[in-house]
Amino acid sequence: MSATASEPHRWFQDYLDPGERLAEVLFGLIMVLTITLTAGLTVGHEPGAAREMLIAVIGGNIAWGIIDGGMYLMSALLDRGRHARLIRVIRNAPDEAAALVPIGRALNDTLIGLSPAEDRLRVYRDLRELALKTEPPTVRITRDDAMGAVASCLLVVLTTVPAVVPFLLMDDTRLALRTSNGLLLGLLFLVGFSWGQYASVNRWLAGLVFLAVGTVLVGVAIAFGG
């Protein structure tokens, strides 16, 4: 792959970790499927239904993407505020023992929390010394936060592409709807497959679980005339 072709992929990697990227795509797919499955009750039966569905898909995911970007910024501010608060608590602790308690709580779910007690204590003490020399960071939105919010929004919006393309290429709106849903289900499998890799579980099983949930949704819609 050329450097130019891989630049967008690297750009998303720069601002979102794998879990965040997969979550954004998953949320976008769920939103699109919710709209297309509901529209399946009228597409092919009512004039203009397909056009209204496409407007709902695009508009809904743009709105959801903006909301998700805003939530990303709020999460970034909360994380930065938590770090600043932890530094202040450590600096204001009356003694070393009191300062090590919040450090231990903060690192309990990390690799440090799984290490032997003497190793943990040494790390906690080093972090206390570092905190005593560090001013709490200013809680504000940074450029990376803003770019992460944009990346989150774009990933959600881009999930509309497989839903829209079949309607641009096919005259039969019901066939286009089936094709659109098939593409979305395939992407659900790929999201589950990728999620399994990063979650250290069976990738095929994870993909099939994601696909099964999507298939159930499609089956329910078809049973009701979709």
Image: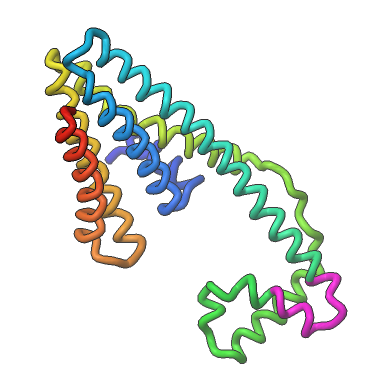
Residue at the image position 41 percent from the left and 36 percent from the top: 155
112 or 58: which is nearer to us?
Answer: 58
Residue at the image position 44 percent from the left and 33 percent from the top: 154
Residues rendered magenta in the picture: 90-102
On screen, 201 above or below 114?
A: above
Give the percent coordinates (x, y) of residue 95. Answer: 84, 82
Residue at the far front in the pictured view: 224
Residue at the image position 53 percent from the left and 85 percent from the top: 115
Give the percent coordinates (x, y) of residue 31. Answer: 37, 35
Residue 135, by quadrant, is: bottom right
Colour convention: rainbow
Q: Is 93 on the left-hand or right-hand side of 186?
A: right
Quadrant of the image for the C terminus?
A: top left
On screen, 59 above or below 200?
A: above
Residue at the image position 29 percent from the left and 13 percent from the top: 51
User: Tag count in the figure?
Assistant: 0
Residue 205, by quadrant, is: bottom left
On screen, 133 above or below 207?
A: below
- Judged by its main secondary structure, the magenta piece is helix
147 or 165: which is nearer to us?
Answer: 165
Residue at the far top in the pictured view: 47
Give the percent coordinates (x, y) of residue 1. Answer: 27, 41
Q: Is 69 on the left-hand or right-hand side of 174?
A: right
Q: Is residue 173 magenta?
A: no
Residue 132, by quadrant, is: bottom right
Give the percent coordinates (x, y) of residue 222. Answer: 16, 33
